[in-house]
Image (cartoon, coloured by chain):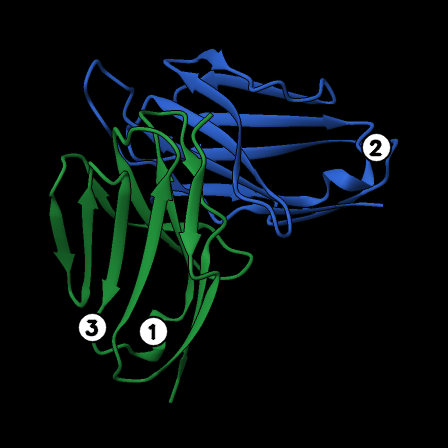
Amino acid sequence: SQELEQSPQSLIVQEGKNLTINCTSSKTLYGLYWYKQKYGEGLIFLMMLQKGGEEKSHEKITAKLDEKKQQSSLHITASQPSHAGIYLCGAGRYKLSFGAGTTVTVRA
Amino acid sequence: ETGVTQTPRHLVMGMTNKKSLKCEQHLGHNAMYWYKQSAKKPLELMFVYSLEERVENNSVPSRFSPECPNSSHLFLHLHTLQPEDSALYLCASSQDRKAGGLYEQFFGPGTRLTVL
């Protein structure tokens, strides 16, 4: 099965500052998904990346896929309290494997 | 109702009880999934139903029994569970996979299950 390692495990950022989360796969990435979860709730789909070098943005969140390095990064610009939560990367064609998640805390 | 809904949201059951979790999707998808999320463990895929046929069960214990009567509904029947089965159970749906196609999965809010 595909293993995904996320780093950091958790981070605390001052409101208005940028942050980056990384996701590294043990196998070739055929598709990479980013989700956000509030504790004890369902996952909210953020973005899907399919091709090497692909980059997508939505509001202040940007995700990139480096196929050669089997890595993806999620970058949040000028963080806000609404960005707080657990960010999960998932990979696979339909049998998704997920990373353990990165807990983001935004301090006012 | 829109998206993916799950009921109940919280469930407490004894080890000898039988209960069922329900999932319903209103997105017109034809693939549905059950995931288990335990504390301090990554999300684990339990079952996949594609076009109402189970295509993957990932070696889940038989005390978990899925049922997919149609493309909009998915059940997880539970019996003689163990305390270690306590977790958040998440349902998801997507378009059916096609050769070379990738489709994002949309998740429900989950059922928080506690086994006493």
Q: Residue B1, can we see it?
A: no
Measured in 3D between alpha carbons, the distance from the residue under mark 1 to the one under mark 2, in whole angstroms, is 40 Å
Marks 2,3: beta carbons within 8 A: no
Left or right for A57, reference A102: left
Query: Under tag 3, what secondary structure?
Result: loop
Q: Of tags 1 and 2, which is closer to the observer?
A: 1
Measured in 3D between alpha carbons, the distance from the residue under mark 2 to the one under mark 3, in whole angstroms, is 49 Å
Amino acid carrying label 2: it is Asn
Left or right for B81, reference B100: right
**Callout 2 crowding tier (Cα within 10 Å): few <14, some 14–19, many ≥20:** few
The colour one sees for chain B in the rendered image is: blue
Q: Residue B116, can we see it?
A: yes
Query: Under tag 1, what secondary structure?
Result: helix
Q: Which of marks 3 and 1 is nearer the N terminus?
A: 3
Location of mark 3 (residue): A77
Who's the residue at 59% across and 49% down the image?
B9
